[in-house]
Amino acid sequence: MQIKITGKQVELSEALRTYVTRELEAIAAKYFDNAREAQVTFGRARSFFTCDINMHVRRGLLLRGEGEAADARAAFDDAAEHIAKRLRRYHRWLVEHARETAHRERPQPARQYILRQAEATEPAETSQQTIDHATYATVVAEMPTEINELSVGEAVMRMDLADQPVLMFRNRATGQLNVVYRRSDGNIGWIDPSEAEAGEAKGEEQ
């Protein structure tokens, strides 16, 4: 597994780099045969060190963990434990579905954009994507992403493993684009347009 370790205004010792590499390789070896890559970023927030771990362990499967502590090593341990906790929760599913996932059709390619709120008096200026001027938003970054064909349960699992607030996917049962997201009350929301379309069709028949 390729591991990239960087620091934002933080000097990283060789001992810390060695420790991070060893611990991440141990986590990957425990749950995956051939993990792909990992990105570990250290930073400072007030008087604390922060650590952000992103691990690509399988096609379409991202693990993410964030940590914060009084020193960099402890911040990494905190982030790594968040990842390990999620892996323990989904270990059985990951083992049982690893071979099945490998033979599925390739995910649908897509583009992900990051929009920055601009001043209301400034028109939106974009060179690569047109945004409604009423939003007063500017595209500040774009990156490739993928839309996978999943069951609802798999989508919730992937969203949790990646520590994301929302995930778009193609529902394997209906073929429709669906969305799962974290609600403010702690529950998971699920948007499925196929149910609404079925209800409209039924109403027209009546």
Image (spheres, rainbow, N blue to C red):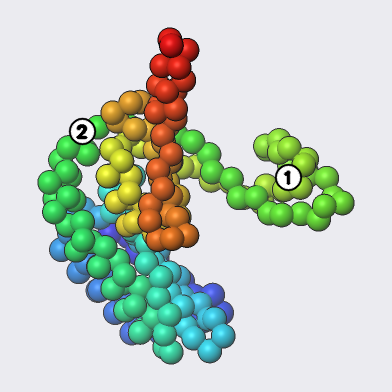
Most distant residue in the top direction: 205
> Mark 2 to mark 1: distance in Å?
41 Å
Q: Amino acid at mark 2?
A: His
Instruction: State whether residue 9 is above or below residue 71.
Output: above
Please identify the quadrant where the N terminus is shown.
bottom left
Which dot marks residue 135? 1
Residue occupying the far right of the picture:
121
Horizontal relation, residue 138 to residue 47: left or right: right
Measuring 49% from the left and 42% from the top, which residue is drawn there?
A: 144
* SS under mark 1: helix
- Residue at x 43% of width, y 89% of height: 70
Mark 2 residue crowding within 10 angstroms, few (<14) / some (14–19) / many (20+): few
In the structure shown, which secondary structural element does the residue marked by tag 2 occupy? loop
Of the two numbered discs 2 and 1 on the same chain, state the one appearing first in sequence: 2
The residue labelled by disc 2 is 103
Q: Position of residue 160 (x, y in %)?
A: 34, 56
Question: In the image, residue 186 lies at what x, y percent?
Answer: 40, 61
Apparent side of residue 132 relative to residue 33 in the rendered image (left or right): right
On the question of residue 96 being in view, the answer is yes
Question: Is residue 181 or residue 85 the one in the foreground?
Answer: 181
Q: Position of residue 62 (x, y in %)?
A: 35, 53
